[in-house]
Amino acid sequence: MNLPITIGMWLLAVLPIVLLLYLMVGRGWGAYKAAPVGLVIALISGLVFYRANLPLIKSEILKGAWNTLSVLLVVWPAILLYEVVNESKAFIVFRQELKRLTPNELLQILAIGWVFVSFLQGITGFGVPVAVGAPILLGLGVKPLYAVIIPLLGHAWAGTFGTLAVAWDALVLQTNLLGMPEQLLQTGLWAGLFIWIYNFSAAILICWFYGKWEGVKKGIPAVALISLIQGGGQLLLTQVNTTLAAFLPATIGLVVILLLNRTKAYGTTWNLETSPIMDRQDSRESGEAYPKEMSMHQAFFPYYALTLITLLVLLIRPLNRFLSQWAISLSFPETQTGYGFINPEVIGYSPITPLTHAGLFLLLAAIIGYFYYLNNGWLEKASRQGILRRSIQKTIPPGLAILGFIIMSRIMGGTGQTYVLAQGIATTLGLSYVIFSPLVGLLGAFMTSSNMSSNILFGGFQLTIAELLGVNGAKIVAAQTAGGTVGTALTPGSIVLGATTAGIMGQEGKILKKLLPIGAILALIIGLLVYISM
């Protein structure tokens, strides 16, 4: 391969990302408008300057379309589930009951926007926690923008070991850590430590958003306890069972935060009337009719169904193996640019297992919820068409945005732009690259909307750079996935999904503008810790 690593080629590689961020953050463009621009720039650069041919471009576009299909299989049923629950007025019931059972408003927000979404990330992932958490927070009176920002921040810590550790397993595969047991444990330990720092920081930020120092002061006892369970528990389980490293602590955290309602600190009514993230003018609570006979558990029934189905399918190994036998995938031939950058032949690219896919779990939960509400008289048969129509209409804009983002990332990866981007950073920075290594993981997650994909894209690269620099590979690889974890809060796919279910489609740039500096600072803090510990 003779792919030139020059300043010109590097600037061309970074241009689509910079332009994307400028349009979304600087100009306030919606994701569905900005994504095609980034895609066109990456496409032109790949063809003209990176010497890609049309068969290569076609192959990468098909890969991107296939990956998009996998995401949309989550997006549409997630929106469908939201529409079913919203139509039944169950969100209003849930809000009323949660306020009665959890009189502390900050604890309500932490319970949903941090703990519950973490639980969902532990078993499902794929943007589901944000899609589910945003409308619930909206129902609690949180302003739409923060109803998306809070679960984005809150669920991301489980981005490596969540979804039963798929992102971690991808990292292990890419770096061949299974063949190095001691380094595997060290990497897990450092990753757990770095992610714990993010976990605690994210929760403190949520408290800060709610009420600045007063919010932090009120929330820190709960945050310290739950973070010890989530972050500390995950850290310990990285040495024992990575599959359950996020799910088990997240489940325990969910139980514990509910028990905090009985303590003196959180068992009495408390809120900040001046909280900048709360909509005190929201008249839905008093002005909109809702079924008074519906209990909170009945209102939440579809989500109980979602949890039960997911746990049964993913944790019962014989059932999971049986259902996973049916897989659908595509195959792609080897492609090569004029510079000799090779994309190996792929047999069975990114297989979709329909019977164990998060989209099926969401669809079943939506169907179960619909008939449950219907049988109890909380929905009318005539509402079915409206629910389906709205869910399809709301899926189209995020679907187009996600398609643009993913195809852009595939073209950048397949033409060598991503390689030049990362290699240029490493070559220029030398040993100080260690500080910025988490930013590479963050960049990968942002580009691909997935920590798993980031680990596949950059895991081996990070280990190679560590060897070239003569530094501890376990720490660098851990920084990679920790950076990807931070990036999970910034992924365009999840942002689009949350904005859709919160009813603010088109405001993704505002969300990203708020989260981008937070993500960059947290990634750099992790990088500084890696550098100091070398």
Image (cartoon, grey):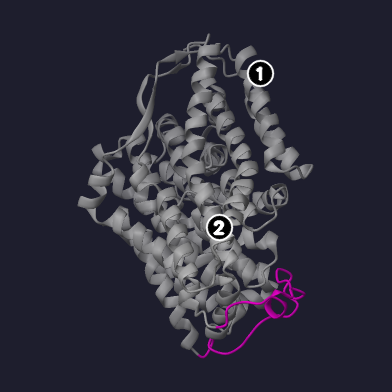
Give the number of the disc on residue 384: 2
Name the secondary structure under disc 2: helix
Q: Quadrant of residue 504?
A: bottom right
What residue is disc 1 on?
Answer: 44
Residue pictured at 59% horizontal, 40% vertical: 399
Local secondary structure at mark 1:
helix
Farthest top residue?
A: 338
At a point 61% along the width and 88% down the height, the residue shown is 269
Residue at 65% across, 42% down: 397
Q: In this view, does 359 lie to the left or right of 492?
A: left
**Based on the displayed image, in which of its 4 quarters is residue 120 positioned?**
bottom left
Which residues lie in the magenta part? 264-292
Q: What residue type is labelled 2?
A: Arg
Query: Looking at the picture, how far across and down is residue 171, in whole percent?
Result: 38, 40
Indicate which disc, 2 or 1, sits on the residue closer to the N terminus: 1
Q: In screen coordinates, is 468 left or right of 142?
A: left
* Residue type at tag 1: Ile
Compute the Cα span from label 2 to label 1.
Answer: 45 Å
Mark 2 vs mark 1, foreground winner is 2
